[in-house]
Image (cartoon, rainbow, N blue to C red):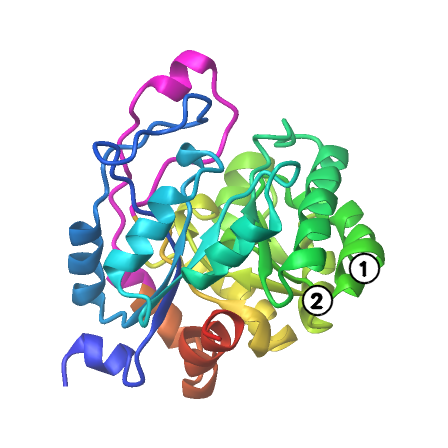
Amino acid sequence: MDVVQKLFPNGGWDVHYHIFEPDRFPYSSNRHLTPPPATIDQFLEHIRKLGITNSVLTHGLSYGSDCSSLRTFVAELGPSKTKAIGVIDPQTVTAEELASMHHDGIRGIRVNVYQYQAMHDVKRQMSALRDHSRVLHEHCPGWSMAFTHTHPEFWVQLKPFMEQEIIPTGIKVVTDHFALLKGASMLQAEKGVSDATQQSGFKEIIELVRNGHIFVKISAPYRVSNQAPNYEDLKPLVRALLDANPRQILWGSDWPHGPPMTVRSREEAMTEIPFLEIDDLAWLKSLRSWLSAEEWNAVMVTNPRALYDW
């Protein structure tokens, strides 16, 4: 049995990746980032090497809230194997559009914090989450709502907000990339802190996971750790999340591995930025060594299937 078969005896889901084909689908003129092409064929070759069998395609923010590319990509990847996460403008989207998106395999949205100029503003993040949750509550029962930001310390304020305004609506909230909690290597480099469990936001995230209030994607380890390719310093975070609630953890590659999230000038946003070189197989093997067989199957198969494949 080869390494891939050992990793995924029951198959495996990648719940966070992007496809960029700007020749077919031009990027938004208001984009925050210009990525190189990352095609369907390249992604299929990527997952073939890893042994991934199912996926959840995440709409690239470089396309704005126009999901025509996303819907085409899902159709070409195969709706039986692929679901998707879209981006909407909650002020203009219609019930008919949302129903059509659902028909085409979309099972959730991601909140574009750039659109709200909310990257570094927790109040604006709350406003964005409130606007999107209202639309989902009214028109899309069962859809999830994902968001990414760069300030784990914001969870001190986001936790009570979520518990009071978002969780009671029944919306399934997903946060990407370890909720941007940092591994010890990056904490030490940035803040001189060596214990990842003591960083601001950690306690709040763990409590939300324990209570089943949010899902966390253990994705894009290079965004939160300097210890590539195995990211050993992320083991305490992974174990804390799994120990809190193994039903709330998902895995995503973040292929094709874009640069860190940041607010860019107009000129920077219009300039193509190359992808990072990441050893996904090494990261998966490292992660597998930290989990029991039951936990691994939950993260890679049963959790994503329950959240997206209905």
Q: Picture coordinates of residue 91 (x, y %)?
A: 66, 36
Residue 137 seen in the figure: yes
SS at badge 1: helix
| Circles 1 and 2 in contact, beta carbons < 8 Å | yes
Task: Locate the N terminus and report the quarter of the image it occupies.
Answer: bottom left
Task: Give me the residue at 81% from left, 59% from top.
Answer: 163
Residue 181 seen in the figure: no
Q: Is disc 1 surrounded by few (<14), some (14 to 19) or many (20+) residues within 10 Å? A: few
Who comes first in sequence, dot 1 or dot 2?
Answer: 1
Residue 163 image label: 1
- The magenta region covers 256-283
Which of 188 and 166 lies nearest the eye of the viewer?
166
Above-or-below relation of 156 to 24: below
Residue tagged 2 = 213
Image check: 244 left or right of 39? right
Image check: 4 left or right of 241? left
Above-or-below relation of 282 to 289: above
Magenta-colored stretch includes residue 81: no
Which of 218 and 78 lies nearest the eye of the viewer?
78
Tell which residue pokes out farthest to the top in this image. 267
Q: Quadrant of residue 282?
A: bottom left
